Image: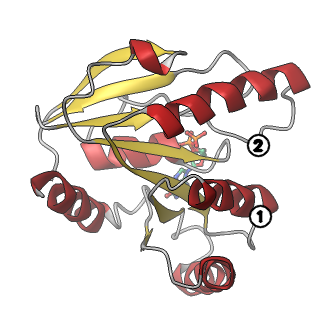
Amino acid sequence: MIKKAVFLTSNSDYTKCPPPDKPEFAFIGRSNVGKSSLINMLTNHKGLAKTSQKPGKTQLINHFHIDDKWYMVDLPGYGFAVASKAMKATWEKMIRNYLTKRENLAAIFVLIDSRLEPQKIDLEFIIWCGENGIPFVLVFTKADKKGIEKSTANARVFLDRAIEIFGEEPQYFITSAEKKEGREELSAFIEGEVRE
Ligand code: GDP
């Protein structure tokens, strides 16, 4: 489990991020998917990632130093309805550069709202990750909201779509920040990767 989490920097340019001297794990997902809540649950730190940020405002690549061993990165969410075309283009360029060029990126956690049927934008994003060789892990969020059975069923439909696309099942976790579920599993996964 994470013991220490320290905010380092916010950047729009991946070249200005902290030196790539430790493994790095990034978190991304549709706006309102529960990313801040998940990060705060993982780090056991209520206000570390800011919840309910106003969608559409300037958004940056946020670095946190975890247990002096690895970097956690909070990436701005995608898919907010009010964003202009220009904002979407800026987001895409920043994220594309970061994800394809950040040399110490070990994996990206792609958050998926477990209340919903598979969303086109999420599928498109993981397809893009696959095409660009970016290792991704799916994290289904808010598993408490509609009950674990409905969440697991939605996750299953999403996973089956992913199997159709990739020919294999992606690694995944089912979580609830509200109920603190999935924290140990996700922490253990990251610790395993950091140790390698
Ligand atoms: P972000 O925009 O992706 O950072 O999402 P937030 O973490 O701000 O969460 C968006 C909304 O979903 C907030 O109202 C949270 O309280 C709620 N939320 C996030 N995670 C959970 C969860 O695991 N269970 C429930 N019931 N609500 C959640």
Visible in this render: residue 84? no
- Per the image, the residue denoted by label 2 is 79
- Relative to 88, 75 lies left or right: left
Q: Residue drawn 52% across and 39% down?
A: 100
Q: Residue drawn 45% across and 54% down?
A: 109
Q: Secondary structure at mark 1?
A: loop
Q: Residue drawn 47% across and 21% down?
A: 14
Question: Of label 2 and label 1, which has the lower sequence position?
Answer: 2
- Relative to 119, 70 lies left or right: left
Res 8 quadrant in image: top left
Q: Say if mark 2 contacts mark 1, CB within 8 Å.
A: yes
Amino acid of disc 1: Gln
Question: Residue 130 in the image: x percent, y percent?
Answer: 58, 61
Along the line of sight, which residue is nearer the eye, 170 or 140? 170
Res 128 quadrant in image: bottom right
Ligand 1 within 8 Å of disc 2? The answer is no
- What colour scheme governs how the chains and residues are painted in the rendered image of this protein? secondary structure
- Per the image, the residue denoted by label 1 is 119
Question: Residue 177 in the image: x percent, y percent?
Answer: 42, 55
Q: Residue drawn 55% across and 16% down?
A: 12
